[in-house]
Amino acid sequence: MTDPLADEARRLRVEEKLSVRDIRARLGIGRDRVYALLHGVPPPDWTRRPRARDDLRAEAVRLRAHGRSVNQIAEQLGVAKSTAYQWVRHLPLDPDEAAAERRRAHSKVMTDARWGAYRELRDAAQAAEHERAAEVVGEVDERVLLMLGAAIYWCEGAKSKPWRRSEKVQFINSDPGLLAIFLRFLESCGVDRSAPTYRVSIHESADADAAVRWWVQRLRLPAERFGRTTLKRHNPTTVRRNTGDDYHGCLVITVPRSRALYWRIEGMIAELFRIADDKRA
C-alpha cells in the first residue's frame, strides 16, 4: 500500500518541479519529513545553484598558480586564511624545490630584520635574570640537597600505591641536569654511583648503543651497571620533536634494597607537606 502523502510529494517534485520549501508549504509538513518522502528523487535543475564561493575557490587556485601565498590570497579575496589554505593546500607554492628554499631563506632574512633587535633585548634580559637567580641559589649544603632530591623524586620517581605496594627507589627522566641532582642526592644518602642499576629507554628508531655511551659519559656512570636497553615502538607519523642527534632517550635509575631510603624520602616529603599546611593555616 502506497503512502498518498509520499506520492503527492514526489509528484510535486517531479512534475511541478517545486523546491523543498514550496513542498513544505503546500503539504504543511516539516523539512525532515519532506526529505524522507523525497528520498531517491533528484532535485530539479533550477535548484542546483552553484555555491556562492565556487568562483572564489577557482580564483584562489588561479592566484596560487601565479605564486601567491595563502596570506595574499586571503587578503585579495576577502576570506579567512584558514579558508584560503583549505582551497589551495594541494598546490605547492613553489613546485621547484630550489625556488622554495630561496623563498624560505628570504622569509627568514625578513623575519630576522624585523625581530632581531627585540630578540637581542629579550636575550639580554633573560641572561640578567638568570644571573640574579643564580646568586639567590648560593651554596647548596647537604640539608638543601636532601630536600631538593626528595622533592624531585616525589615528582618524577616511582611511588608506592595503596593498591600496589612497591617501596623501591626508581627514578626516570630525560633531563641530564635533573638526573645529576638526583645522583648527588643519592650520594648524600650514602648511595654511591656504582650501586644503582641503570637502563636506557629509547625509541627503536634511535641509536640505542650511542645513547648508552652518552649517558655514561655525561653523568660519569659505570658502564657495567647498565642493563638491557628498553626500546619503545617508533611511530612514523609522530609529532614529537625529540628525534634528532640530541635525543638520548630516558635514563632509569634503580636503587637495589632501597626500602629504607624510600621511607626516608616519604618522611621528608610528609614533613614538607606539614610545613606547607601550617603556613597556610
Image (tube, rainbow, N blue to C red):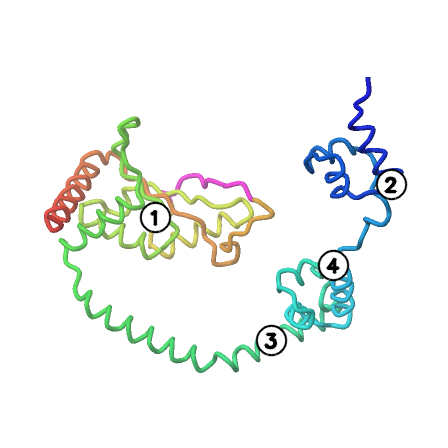
Task: Residue 180: give x, y in percent of width and height.
Answer: 30, 54
In this picture, which residue range is highlighted in magenta? Answer: 224-234
Nearer to me, 274 or 34: 34
Q: Earlier in the sequence, mark 2 or mark 4?
A: 2
Residue at the spot 62% in from the left edge and 75% down from the top edge: 105
Image: 181 above or below 56: above
Q: Earlier in the sequence, mark 3 or mark 2?
A: 2
As drawn, the label of residue 180 is none
Camera-near label (2 vs 1) is 2
Amino acid type assigned to the residue bearing label 4 in the image: Ala
Q: Is residue 31 left or right of residue 275?
A: right
Amino acid type assigned to the residue bearing label 2 in the image: Glu
Task: Residue 134: give x, y in percent of width and height.
Answer: 24, 68
Q: Quadrant of residue 123?
A: bottom left
As drawn, the label of residue 52 is 4
Decide: few, some or many residues near mark 3? Use Cα within 10 Å; few <14, some 14-19, many ≥20.
few
- Numbered disc 2: secondary structure: loop
